[in-house]
């Protein structure tokens, strides 16, 4: 397949015009030429967006418990519903989330959720790329038993095709030291990165210091669980020393600005983290705390929030933010063969229609991507050279997915969830 007569974002922070050719899943040629003078810009091709932290099947729970403080949000609104979810529910939520992500140019997602095998099967069927993991949790009374073995077994499965499997702990506060050390030991031969939440709230960060005399990052590093690198969601309360440890261990900071603001958690100091050499990527988190999977919105917010916090419009250039959503995300997930439009790289692309009122005039394309563009401007999403979303003809299509069936499946499964949540709200 080829994408002709398009503007494109290229490595080295360059903008070009021409044709991108794809063969056998990779970009086989990038033919640049001068843009015809006087012609209005037609389309812009970007590397496919990489959502580095998500719980995709939470699309089943979109917006539930909005406005509650984090702990009540989890315990009163989220956990009771999640406890009843089945494999088929998670598959339906995963498929629906993939439809949303593909519609907005996301080609790869790092997911953390239970019913992991069912989720993996559903994601594979959509054609998207994904790094999945079995969430490691351990409670003081020893339950749930066998969790460590399942975590390792899933990582060993490695899945193949467009899916990879990583190791995972939910967080410092939902595991214990023995669990982390045992997982670290098992991972010596696997060598997979760790997907985890860390220092999301001040309470969680401070309680870890009270428990272990160290920050969550320092404590986890001491267990050996970060020795093969990883990607850490949130990092809102991380210290400079934490960032130094992350840079040394090859742990990516996954910034989730929407989720952190919606849950009132704070603002991760990503500019400082970047100064200290940490790779920074972007994630949406699940739709119960966002409430969408829109990576353009994350780019926009990441840019604005940190300029505002620093009282400085020069922090985080549009290119810095675009790389967070593409190349840096690919690196975090061990997918250095993607994340850029260059010959030999994976043919994962998203193409945006520039013929929209809010995208003209198009003076500065990177600035336009971060500050003017919406996910709904995406008209074509390609993974491994295969078209997975196409709305160029006006009517959106997802060639690998039965859209009507996916919608029916989602709506029939969420009707009961909606009734239960309405009853919970009535009781408040
Ligand atoms: Zn999360």
Image (cartoon, rainbow, N blue to C red):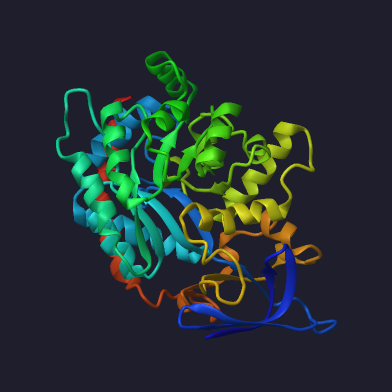
Q: Is residue 407 visible?
A: no
Q: Is residue 295 visible?
A: yes
Residue in view at x 30 percent, y 59 percent: 158
Please, is residue 27 above or below residue 129 in the view?
Answer: below
Number of numbered discs overlaid on the protein picture = 0
Ligand 1 position by quadrant: top left
**Residue 348 image position (x, y, % from top left):** 51, 70
Determine the residue located farthest toward the right in the rendered image: 37
Give the left or right position of residue 42, taking residue 416 as reference: right
Q: Quadrant of residue 369?
A: bottom right
Please, is residue 112 above or below residue 217 in the view?
Answer: below
Determine the residue located farthest toward the top in the rendered image: 210
**Residue 394 image position (x, y, % from top left):** 54, 78
Residue in view at x 57 percent, y 54 percent: 328
Please, is residue 36 above or below residue 218 in the view?
Answer: below
Give the left or right position of residue 400, taking residue 87 as reference: right
Residue in view at x 61 percent, y 28 percent: 240
**Residue 268 image position (x, y, % from top left):** 58, 34
Give the quadrant of the C terminus.
Answer: top left
Give the left or right position of residue 409, taking residue 38 as reference: left
Residue in view at x 48 percent, y 51 percent: 52
Determine the residue located farthest toward the left in the rendered image: 145
Q: Quadrant of residue 342?
A: bottom right
**Residue 316 image position (x, y, % from top left):** 71, 45
């Amino acid at each position: 397949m080829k994408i002709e007569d398009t503007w494109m974002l290229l490595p080295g922070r360059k903008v070009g015009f021409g044709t991108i050719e794809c063969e056998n899943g990779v970009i086989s040629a990038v033919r640049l030429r001068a843009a015809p003078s006087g012609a209005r810009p037609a389309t812009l091709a970007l590397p496919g967006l990489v959502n580095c932290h998500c719980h995709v099947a939470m699309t089943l729970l979109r917006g539930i418990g909005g406005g509650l403080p984090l702990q009540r949000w989890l315990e009163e609104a989220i956990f009771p519903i999640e406890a009843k979810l089945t494999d088929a529910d998670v598959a339906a939520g995963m498929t629906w989330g993939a439809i949303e992500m593909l519609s907005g140019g996301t080609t790869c997602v790092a997911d953390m959720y239970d019913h992991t095998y069912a989720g993996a099967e559903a994601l594979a069927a959509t054609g998207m790329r994904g790094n999945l993991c079995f969430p490691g949790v351990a409670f003081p009374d020893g339950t749930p038993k066998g969790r460590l073995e399942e975590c390792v077994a899933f990582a060993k499965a490695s899945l193949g095709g467009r899916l990879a499997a990583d190791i995972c702990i939910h967080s410092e506060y939902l595991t214990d030291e023995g669990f982390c050390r045992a997982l670290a030991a098992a991972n010596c031969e696997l060598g997979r990165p760790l997907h985890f939440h860390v220092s999301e709230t001040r309470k969680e960060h401070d309680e870890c210091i009270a428990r272990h005399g160290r920050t969550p990052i320092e404590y986890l590093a001491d267990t050996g669980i970060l020795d093969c690198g990883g990607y850490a969601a949130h990092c809102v309360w991380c210290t400079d020393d934490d960032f130094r440890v992350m840079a040394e261990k090859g742990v990516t900071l996954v910034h989730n600005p929407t989720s952190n603001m919606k849950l009132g958690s704070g603002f991760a100091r990503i500019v400082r983290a970047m100064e200290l050499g940490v790779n920074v990527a972007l994630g949406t988190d699940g739709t119960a705390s966002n409430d969408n999977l829109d990576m353009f919105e994350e780019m926009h917010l990441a840019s604005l929030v940190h300029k505002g916090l620093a009282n400085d419009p020069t922090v985080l250039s549009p290119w810095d933010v675009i790389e967070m959503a593409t190349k840096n995300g690919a690196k975090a997930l061990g997918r250095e063969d993607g994340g850029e439009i260059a010959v030999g790289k994976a043919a994962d692309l998203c193409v945006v229609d520039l013929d929209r009122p809010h995208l003209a005039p198009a003076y500065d394309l990177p600035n336009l991507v971060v500050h003017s563009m919406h996910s709904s401007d995406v008209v074509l999403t390609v993974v491994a050279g295969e078209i997975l979303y196409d709305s160029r003809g006006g009517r959106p299509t997802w060639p690998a997915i039965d859209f009507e069936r996916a919608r029916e499946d989602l709506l029939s499964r969420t009707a009961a969830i909606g009734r239960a949540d309405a009853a919970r709200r009535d009781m408040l």
